[in-house]
Image (spheres, grey):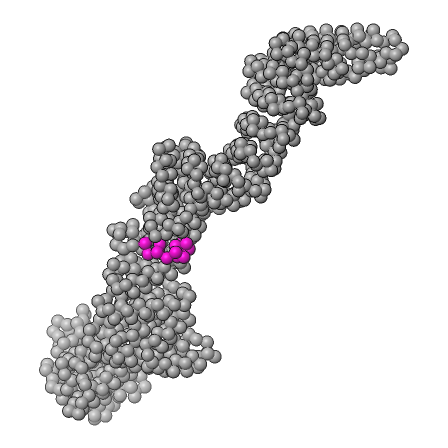
Amino acid sequence: MQMNPYSHKHQLGRVTLSRSTHQVSWNPDLTGLRQSEREACEFIQEFLEEGQPSESEKLKFLRAVETLSATVQAQANGNMNDYFPKTILAKKIEVLILEESTEVLVSSVHQRAMLCIVALSQVNPPFYLSQKLDLVNAGLSSIFSLPLIMPSLDRKESASLYLQTVQALDDMLQALVMEDMDPDMSLLQNFLEIILPWLTLSEKVHQQVRALGTISRMLRFICNFPRLSQHMMEFSMTGKMMGILGLSCMNANHEISIEASEALHYFFKILVLHRSMKQKTEIILKDLQKNFRGGWFANIQNLAMFFRKYLTPEERADVIMVPMEAMTRASRHDVCAASKMLKMILKHPMPEIGKVPEIIQYIYHNMNRITETTAQETIKKILYLLAQTYTEEVILTLFNMEDGSQRGVCKPWEILASFPKGYEVIMEFLLQKLTPYQKSKGQEPSHSTEISPLIATRAIQELLLEPSRRTEVQTFFPSLCMALLFQISFLVVEGDTDFQDQQHATERMDPVSSSVEALKTLMRSTGYGDYVSYIQKLGGWELLTSPEGHYEGVTLLARAMVIKNCWHNRPIFSFLIRILQERDHKNRLTAFMFLTELLRCPDVAATVDEVTVHILANWFQCEEPAIVKLLLRVVETFAKHGNMVQQFRILEPYVLGCCYSLDDDIVMETFTVLKCLVEHLTWKHSSSFLTQLTFMLGPLFEEESEHLRLMAFEIYGALLAKVKRTVLVFPLKHQVLNLIVLLVLHLEDANVNVAQICRPALCHTATILGWSRLKAIFAEKDVWTILRALLKQEGKRALWFLKQCLALFKSPQAPIRQTAVRFAGQIIQTLDAEEANEIEEVYTALKYMREDPDSMVSCLAAQTLYILEAKEKLLVNPPTSCFCSRRPRKTYS
């Protein structure tokens, strides 16, 4: 007799088992039992001790166990262990079931054994889970393994016995699945997991039919318990069951299809009872009843409805996995049925799906095993739909698998690229994932498990390598090109690669190289392969990856696109203008570097409207010198194009404002640009700006910085060269006259280059003023000759010249101050009484000039004061003197 092994002596009631002797002794207390019950106990004890019982003894033993079970059940606190260990009895019955022949059914032992289990299940103690599963496994295998029993006149008894045995099996399953007064859904799941292999793995139709019939009857039994909602959470194979039953409905065998249809109907009914709104339950059940045992199409339609409305995202994933797994099978019918089923459930807008990584992994590893054309298209559509909705999970899963296994197991990227709309959605998504690099500090990307910009870059490159989507790439080129360039700038300049997936993402290539390769791939995919080579020859790619030469590399890249007349220059410019509307853009410097070069292209410049110019103008307010310098270069470019007068006028005040910047580099850059502007602008279109510039330059002629002073004179000299006599009107004429003395005195400038500029400037001044005699003197004579000639010819402007001298008293150059003071003294001597009344300011200035650090200047100032004092004494006696009304002045000695 076979017994369960025990590792130690275990006492239940009055029973003692010893593993070492394999001897079992019982001494049940038979007090209070009726005669028949005592006899049942005695026979059970005898049977358990026998070795090879006959069939009649087996049946008698089973009846005795049923009798004793009824007795224990009738007792108030009855327990089977008070008589015999329930575990021993169950194991013995399991052995009896397994000992029965699976070739032919001629005995009722099967039937009686399973009914005996039903009786035992009604008494304490309850069966252990392992006992239940062993009994279910034994009962199912003993019945399902039997050969097909066809009803016939000569086999009536055999068919009847089979039906009774099947009924007993159903009774046993229903009894064992119960826990207290309700079915235990976790037990039901365990039972179904034992039954399903007979359906999915068996190649025998009658075994599949039996499995489906058993499932159907169990589900019908469960439908009788409307309070199961609290236990449904324990049942985790809803999706798998629906998928298997739905696929079985489409089986070519009519019996299998009918049984599956019935089982699916009851399964739907369970879901309706426990997941639908109560007021709608009855209506839905009536609609379901109409299709009871209906055709496969009606069942799959219902399945599609339940898929959307009654399942959780994880359960929907389980449903999808079933037909996908069927597609890898050899049977063409299975493959076609699976394809049809998937098409129907995915026909409507796809609801939320769970377990996306698992689905993608299955597709990735099994794509090559799916050879049927329709199935391949279905799988592609699933991947496409998931990628559209769950782009992040799909891409992360693909990379995780590619990094963890051999590359090229299948071609998921090719599949993703094969759907135009899907390609666009994925590219848009990946572009958004590059934006953390474009946000300013304080808006750092989150360190979650989401796709990082580096993973997005790799995904973009994978998609770009697929040749089927060239048209879509053209559309994405501007934004994608700039996003990748911004990413490179961020990585190279900021050097911040502290992302959770950094080490994982860079196993094959560092982040900067990966980004540069993606940019090259993009350009090749768009038809700009020659640009890549051209930039390579110029060393642009190496510069782009160098922290020291990065921005030079950006400039080279943009310049190459201008030189090669790239078709996308205008769209890229528009994209840059859009992003520059945000003042906090992380890569604004890179954007301006690129934009500045693009504006050299006439086609791009032609797109610049007033709105664009105002966007650029607003950036003059930023505190970044590099950007302001680039804006100045933009202004220079506008001037060079010659046809952007309106755009230039908007920027004029901003350019002139930069002359007063506190940043010396900006001031120098401004003057460099102003030189270019004077060269390219015309009086016809820019007279107002050039006139303003003339006035603005005045204070800068006495700058201590030689370089800045030289540039101021260069600009003024170039500006005068453009002036014709016809345009010399107020206020320009006034300013030209106001700077004559300054130009003469700076012929003695410490900077020889300034002096060389002043002489031709004086000559041109004489030309436009019509001073032909003075022009000859300006061209050749020394400073004092020029001053005397100027004062002689333009004596009526003597007071004006004196005021110009007064301004030059503050010159940082001592020789110029000397000449200014001396010339002032000469002018004073020529003034008449009325004019002399206007020089009070000169007296005050000369008084302070006596303290000049240069002794010559100080001496000249004192001498000039004596001259003034002497002149005053001469003019004080005549009654008409202008000094008569002046109060006495203190002497300056």
Let me know if residue 386 appears in the view.
Answer: yes
Q: Residue 200 or 38: which is nearer the viewer?
A: 200
Question: Along the horizontal axis of the image, is 664 left or right of 231?
Answer: right
**Rendered image quadrant of residue 95:** bottom left
Question: Along the horizontal axis of the image, is 723 left or right of 672?
Answer: right
Question: Along the horizontal axis of the image, is 699 left or right of 254?
Answer: right
Question: x, y (%) of residue 50?
Answer: 11, 82
Q: Residue furthest right?
A: 879
State whether residue 654 is above or below residue 114: above
State whether residue 701 is above or below residue 375: above
Question: x, y (%) of residue 814?
Answer: 63, 12
Let me know if residue 500 appears in the view.
Answer: no
Question: x, y (%) of residue 491?
Answer: 41, 40
State whether residue 389 is above or below residue 171: above
Question: Along the horizontal axis of the image, is 749 left or right of 112?
Answer: right
Does the segment drawn in magenta span residue 417?
A: yes
Quadrant of the snapshot with the N terminus: bottom left
Q: Residue furthest left?
A: 52
Does the segment drawn in magenta span residue 550?
A: no
**Rendered image quadrant of residue 831:** top right
Query: What residue appears at the point 38 percent right and 78 percent down from the top-left corner?
Result: 269
Query: What residue appears at the point 73 percent right and 10 percent down from the top-left corner?
Result: 792
Q: Residue 337 or 114: which is nearer the viewer?
A: 337
The secondary structure that most of the magenta stretch takes on is: helix
Quadrant of the snapshot with the C terminus: top right
Question: x, y (%) of residue 783?
Answer: 64, 9
For the magenta stretch, what is the residue range? 414-426
Q: Residue 229 or 813: which is nearer the viewer?
A: 813
**Rendered image quadrant of residue 642:** top right
Query: What residue appears at the point 39 percent right and 80 percent down from the top-left corner?
Result: 288
Query: What residue appears at the point 23 percent right and 84 percent down from the top-left corner?
Result: 166
Q: Residue 216 or 763: which is nearer the viewer?
A: 763
